């Protein structure tokens, strides 16, 4: 689902908490973005430190349209996200969004798969599907962690949740596709977000079971609006305008049909 409206705002920090040692939950006052955003989209945040000119893309974890707030859950991985982790209520940060394309949600029995920092946007999707009337029984979610789980309790309020980790430290041992096979978890359509190896496995699983899959790609981005071509991904068919087998993840995605992209 594509949204054409995007906004550049000076947003006030409402809350910030640490969910794990390196994962933070940041809630911003961003009324226009909250009203326009759909699951699968993202925003970019700008650092105040002048040497860090490029914005940092972060998926939208949740919106509260009534309060005009946007929740972002992100991992501290570098100087930019470390700066954001120091923000406190009352501080402001420059944000642009919503950006990119979201998920198509007209599905009766969705199967959501999230891995690592690809889990937060799945919560936004799960809550929107629940609001559309999808019951807990028919809303199935598989969450893949490194070690420490986060957001799982929020999913459990509205969905049937399965937890897995590569080491077996939490939940079942293996990746999200291993869990789907072991537990025979199926649905009408797979929705997924996570690292490329996970998405590659999801694409293969969808093909084997003749299921459509919508996947959200993770790529390094620079501008976030499709101008710089820093986040292109290979596609099966050529682009209708430029006649090359690539798409811009920030502009044409981040959500694609699994069959459209090469992983």
Image (tube, rainbow, N blue to C red):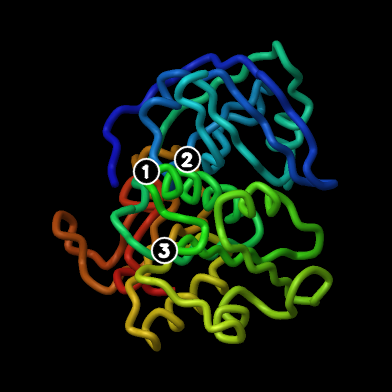
208, above or below 70, in the image: below
Which residue, given by chain and number where applicable, does mark 1 sit on?
A: 100
Q: For this view, does 257 lie left or right of residue 196? A: left
Q: Who comes first in sequence, dot 2 or dot 1?
A: 2
Q: Nearer the viewer, mark 3 or mark 1?
A: 3
Q: Who comes first in sequence, dot 3 or dot 1?
A: 1
Q: Which x, y percent locates residue 248? A: 35, 53
Question: Few, some or many C-alpha atoms within 10 Å of disc 3 (few <14, some 14-19, many ≥20)?
Answer: many
Q: Nearer the viewer, residue 226 or 202?
A: 202
164, above or below 135, in the image: below
200, above or below 10, in the image: below
Q: Which x, y percent locates residue 164? A: 70, 71
Question: Few, some or many C-alpha atoms within 10 Å of disc 2 (few <14, some 14-19, many ≥20)?
Answer: many
> Which label belongs to residue 229?
none
The quadrant holding residue 233 is: bottom left
Which residue, given by chain and number where applicable, does mark 2 sit on?
A: 42
Q: Nearer the viewer, residue 68 or 40?
A: 68
Residue at 81%, 58% in the rendered image: 148
Residue at 38%, 55% in the rendered image: 255
Which residue, given by chain and number where applicable, does mark 3 sit on?
A: 110
Q: For this view, does 153 lie left or right of residue 122? A: right
Q: Mark 2 and mark 1 in contact? Answer it, CB < 8 Å.
A: yes
The quadrant holding residue 177 is: bottom right
Residue at 70%, 46% in the rendered image: 75
Give the spatial CA distance, label 2 vs label 1.
7 Å
Q: Which x, y percent locates residue 152? A: 69, 54
Q: Mark 3 and mark 1 in contact? Answer it, CB < 8 Å.
A: no
Question: Few, some or many C-alpha atoms within 10 Å of disc 1 (few <14, some 14-19, many ≥20)?
Answer: many
Q: Nearer the viewer, mark 2 or mark 3?
A: 3
Give the spatial CA distance, label 2 vs label 3.
21 Å
Give the spatial CA distance, label 3 vs label 1.
21 Å
Residue that lies at the very extreme toward the top in this rendered image: 90
């Amino acid at each position: 689902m594509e949204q054409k409206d995007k906004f550049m705002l000076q947003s006030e920090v409402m809350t910030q908490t640490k969910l794990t040692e390196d994962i933070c939950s940041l809630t911003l006052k961003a009324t226009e973005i909250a009203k326009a955003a759909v699951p699968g989209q993202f925003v970019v945040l700008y650092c105040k430190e002048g040497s860090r000119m490029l914005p940092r893309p972060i998926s939208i974890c949740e919106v509260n349209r009534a309060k005009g707030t946007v929740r972002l859950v992100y991992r501290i991985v570098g100087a930019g996200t470390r700066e954001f982790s120091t923000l406190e209520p009352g501080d402001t940060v420059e944000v642009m969004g919503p950006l990119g394309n979201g998920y198509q949600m007209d599905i009766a029995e969705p199967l959501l798969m999230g891995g690592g920092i690809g889990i937060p946007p799945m919560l936004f999707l799960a809550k929107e599907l629940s609001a559309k009337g999808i019951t807990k029984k028919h809303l199935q979610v598989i969450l893949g962690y490194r070690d420490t789980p986060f957001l799982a309790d929020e999913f459990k309020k509205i969905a049937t949740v399965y937890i897995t980790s590569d080491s077996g430290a939490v939940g079942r041992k293996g990746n999200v596709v291993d869990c789907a096979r072991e537990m025979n978890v199926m649905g009408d359509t797979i929705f997924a977000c996570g690292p490329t190896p996970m998405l590659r496995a999801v694409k293969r699983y969808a093909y084997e079971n003749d299921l459509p899959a919508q996947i959200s790609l993770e790529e390094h981005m620079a501008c976030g609006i499709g101008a710089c071509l820093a986040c292109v991904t290979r596609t099966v068919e050529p682009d209708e305008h430029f006649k090359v087998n690539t798409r811009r993840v920030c502009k044409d995605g981040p959500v694609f049909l699994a069959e459209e992209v090469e992983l």
